[in-house]
Amino acid sequence: MLQQHKDMIQMNKEGWNKVAGQFFEGSFERLSYGTYAPSEEELNLLGTVADCAILEVGCGSGHTLEYLAKRGARELCGVDLSGAQIETARQVVSKLDTPVVLVEAPMEEMSELPENYFDKAVSIYALGWTVDLPRTLSHVHRSLKPGGIFVFSWEHPVHSVVEYSDEVLKFRRSYVSESFERHEAWRGTPIVMHNRKVSTFINALIGAGFVIDAVIEESEVDEGDTVNPAKWYSGAKARIIPSTLIIKCHKSRVEGEAS
Ligand SMILES: C[S@@+](CC[C@H](N)C(=O)[O-])C[C@H]1O[C@@H](n2cnc3c(N)ncnc32)[C@H](O)[C@@H]1O
């Protein structure tokens, strides 16, 4: 791996360990794909999870693992960069009967995952943190069984470039120029994000060998939503731009065949 990538992963690991406490949330009642996004209960992208082996990339504090376990998943594996997140996830999954393996590792370095093993993989608001999208997707693809499903959500790349100020939506940077963006104090800590277009996610999935089943760009905003429009996620913004991008894809059943 490039030294530049290693440095960014290290910086983000330190950052995530500091901010993890701000993300210890989630529910096993409902699988949320993100603020203002339709939920799994509405979309049914994962389908039945009973008796499935499932990988979660960027599992955070483990609530999605708990959700999957409570719906009958046979075994689970959660990978996350942050030791603080993994520690909370360990407490959350310790109450479950389902076997759960937790791995503290960057998603760019998941080469130890078993091959052709998981029935499904999921990633909620985590995949976009990767500093090497093709490499991460190749690990996910390799670890899935033929026909295995991968569903991920991430902040919609258009939402990421637009901010609401003075009652107007403004582009704060270029959508087309993709680059690493260093935030000196993201939630109070330095961190690096990679700006990507929607097409970059789609083309990287195709490049890794996935077949795309669905791309979802829907917002669900209550009529009476009065969240301050200047907040990063607000109903006013989500009525105009989807806050979340959700993609469902699968590994083809026959090697090299897009079906
Ligand atoms: C916004 S949180 C989402 C967590 C969880 N999926 C959820 O829905 O609550 C993003 C997660 O990605 C993890 N993460 C960031 N960069 C990562 C990387 N390179 N490899 C693995 N995990 C990473 C963070 O530690 C964090 O737990």
Image (cartoon, rainbow, N blue to C red):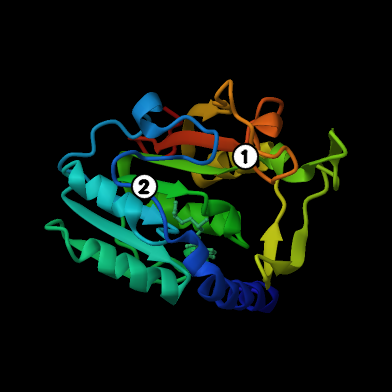
Indicate whether 70 appears above or below 85. above
Query: Under tag 2, what secondary structure?
Result: strand
Q: Any mark on residue 121, and which?
A: 2
Where does label 1 land, which residue?
Answer: 203
| Any part of residue 117 in sight | no
* Lateral position of residue 243 relative to residue 158, left or right: left
Q: Earlier in the sequence, mark 1 or mark 2?
A: 2
Amino acid marked by disc 1: Asn
Q: Dot 2 surroundings within 10 Å: few (below 14), some, or many (20 or more)?
A: many
Of the residues shown, which amino acid type is indicated by label 2?
Answer: Ala
Near mark 1 (Cα within 10 A), the count class, few <14, some 14-19 or many ≥20, is some
Query: Quarter of the image containing the N terminus?
Result: bottom right
Q: Is residue 221 above or below residue 52?
A: above
Picture quarter containing residue 134?
bottom right
x and y, in percent, of residue 104 in the image: 40, 73
- Where residue 244 appears, as percent x and y from the top left, is 58, 37
Q: Residue furthest left?
A: 97
Q: Secondary structure at mark 1?
A: helix
